[in-house]
């Protein structure tokens, strides 16, 4: 199971730094702050939420099927393992 | 190279390129060169659905209430969707299977095409419910100039690749004259045709479907034609997966993770690939103009729909390294996301209608009074 910690910070380029919500996906944590993230499937297969990961580490509980580059993550199905720095598309 | 249905050469599929290597022999999935296709197959099969599971009987009443311009939008859309899935139900099989060299990709293409045939069957399901005899609707698909224009553009890349592959498989590389027309067949040219075809398929799954999806869901936003919308939601979910697969193929090539020659071709043909996408955007905008020629519908007009095409094109093009050519940054149709979200698609079997006793005799009308004698 996830060792998803509860006080991780996510610094979003051109937006504020937010606190990751425990048990929530990264996408949900960002949405709670009223920041718009593009999404479709919310299950990791469409790639609509593709986001650049500048710093930090994430884990996936379901395999991300959508195409992502080596420096990209899918917020809809990933969970931060460390503090993150990301840039939304 | 002549095609064989069971290649007798004992080759290692892990070292074959995705296309134009040895034909596949053993259909084995215990090992995979590109694991992603096996995962896509699993996901696609988990999505299995049948159009008959969705009760569309209420749509008939809704349809009668639509204005003439709305009927034009609804029916034209269905015709276009029928055309797209008619092409997609056969073309990936015929164009790609004869040149695929790894089993997991071969099976993915077969699985993908199979789901397109489910989509085709669901259009018949929808139309048969709306009209006693839907023949005139189907017949118009090969008469209607607006639809034929699109069909020609979509099928030309497939047809080009299929014809060149046939020449190569029967006569090999070289200059061949067929019916007085000379054709130069070389591996490089074949791979270029494959690359352009894959880009055209990618553009089809990425944006061509979305103008019609937006119209369908705009009706559903007004609580109209909801049976149809349920079916299109299932179709949209499948199409999203198909799009993911062509994005993977294009990126595997471009990043040099498969056939190194394809990486060169991807670089060389980048301009042409961009043009394929931009042409599709332009044609979808023309289609939007045709849909709304008799008037708009509540919640949707030509301008917003064209903006949506640009918005979605930006995302799709950046996913395959073609940048974001349009200025638009925010989603002009935010409610679309609710329909494309897979959480809103999946229903427990007991919640959906079982097809064996659903042949139009189910009363799908539920009123508050029906729960009158219901106590907790």
Image (cartoon, coloured by chain):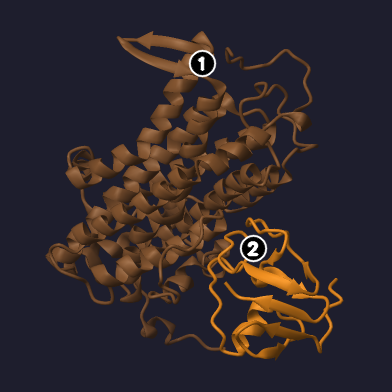
Chain colours: A orange, B brown
Q: Residue at x 43, y 51 (%)?
A: B51
Crowding at dot 1, Cα within 10 Å, few <14 / some 14-19 / many 20+, comes out as many
Above/below status of B125 relative to B347:
above
Q: Whole-Å distance between the Cαs marked 1 and 2? A: 39 Å
Above/below status of A36 relative to B66:
below
Chain under callout 1: B
The residue closer to the viewer here, B315 or B206, is B315
Q: Residue at x 51, y 32 (%)?
A: B192
Chain under callout 2: A
- The spot of residue B73 in percent (x, y) is 22, 61
Which mark is on residue A44?
Answer: 2
- The spot of residue A55 in percent (x, y) is 77, 74
Whether residue B85 is visible to the viewer of this picture, yes or no, is: yes
The residue closer to the viewer here, B371 or B175, is B175
What residue sits right under mark 1 in the picture? B168
The residue closer to the viewer here, B216 or A77, is A77
Q: Residue at x 66, y 44 (%)?
A: B37
Instruction: Look at the image and tell me in which quarter the C terminus of chain B lies.
Output: bottom right
The residue closer to the viewer here, A23 or A18, is A18
- Secondary structure, mark 1, is helix
The answer as to whether the residues below labels 1 and 2 share one chain is no
Q: Residue at x 58, y 15 (%)?
A: B3
- The spot of residue B58 in percent (x, y) is 30, 65
- Secondary structure, mark 2, is loop
């Amino acid at each position: 199971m996830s060792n998803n910690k509860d006080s991780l910070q996510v610094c979003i380029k051109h937006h504020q730094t937010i606190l990751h919500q425990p048990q929530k996906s990264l996408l949900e944590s960002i949405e709670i702050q009223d920041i718009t993230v593009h999404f479709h499937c919310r299950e990791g297969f469409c790639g609509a939420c593709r986001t650049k990961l500048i710093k930090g580490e994430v884990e996936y509980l379901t395999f991300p099927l959508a195409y992502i580059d080596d420096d990209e993550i899918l917020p809809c199905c990933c969970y931060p393992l460390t503090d993150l720095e990301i840039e939304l598309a | 190279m002549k095609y064989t249905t069971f290649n007798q050469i004992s080759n290692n599929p892990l070292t074959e390129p995705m296309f134009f290597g040895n034909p596949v022999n053993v259909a084995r999935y215990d090992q995979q060169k590109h694991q992603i296709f096996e995962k896509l197959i699993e996901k696609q099969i988990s999505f299995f659905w049948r159009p008959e599971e969705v009760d569309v009987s209420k749509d008939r009443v809704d349809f009668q209430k639509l204005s003439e311009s709305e009927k034009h939008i609804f029916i034209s859309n269905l015709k276009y969707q029928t055309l797209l899935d008619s092409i997609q139900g056969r073309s990936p099989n015929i164009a790609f299977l004869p040149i695929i060299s790894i089993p997991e990709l071969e099976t993915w293409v077969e699985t993908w095409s199979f789901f397109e045939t489910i989509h085709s069957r669901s259009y018949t399901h929808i139309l048969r419910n709306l009209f006693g005899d839907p023949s005139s609707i189907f017949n118009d698909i090969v008469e209607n100039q607006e639809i034929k224009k699109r069909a020609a553009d979509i099928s030309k890349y497939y047809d080009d690749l299929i014809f060149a592959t046939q020449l190569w498989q029967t006569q090999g590389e070289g200059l061949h004259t067929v019916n007085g027309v000379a054709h130069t067949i070389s591996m490089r040219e074949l791979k270029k045709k494959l690359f352009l075809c894959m880009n055209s398929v990618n553009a089809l799954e990425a944006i061509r479907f979305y103008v019609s999806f937006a119209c369908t869901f705009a009706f559903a936003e007004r609580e109209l034609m909801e049976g149809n919308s349920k079916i299109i939601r299932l179709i949209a979910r499948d199409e999203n997966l198909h799009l993911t697969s062509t994005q993977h193929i294009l990126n595997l090539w471009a990043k040099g993770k498969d056939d190194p020659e394809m990486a060169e071709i991807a670089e060389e043909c980048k301009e042409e690939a961009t043009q394929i996408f931009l042409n599709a955007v332009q044609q979808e905008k023309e289609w939007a103009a045709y849909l709304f020629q008799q008037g708009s519908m509540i919640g949707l007009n030509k301008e917003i729909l064209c903006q949506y095409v640009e918005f979605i094109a930006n995302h799709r093009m950046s996913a395959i390294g073609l940048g974001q050519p349009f200025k638009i940054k925010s989603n002009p149709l935010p409610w679309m996301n609710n329909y494309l979200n897979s959480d809103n698609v999946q229903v427990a079997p007991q919640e959906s209608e079982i097809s064996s006793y659903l042949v139009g005799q189910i009363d799908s009308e539920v009123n508050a009074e029906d729960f009158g004698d219901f106590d907790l």
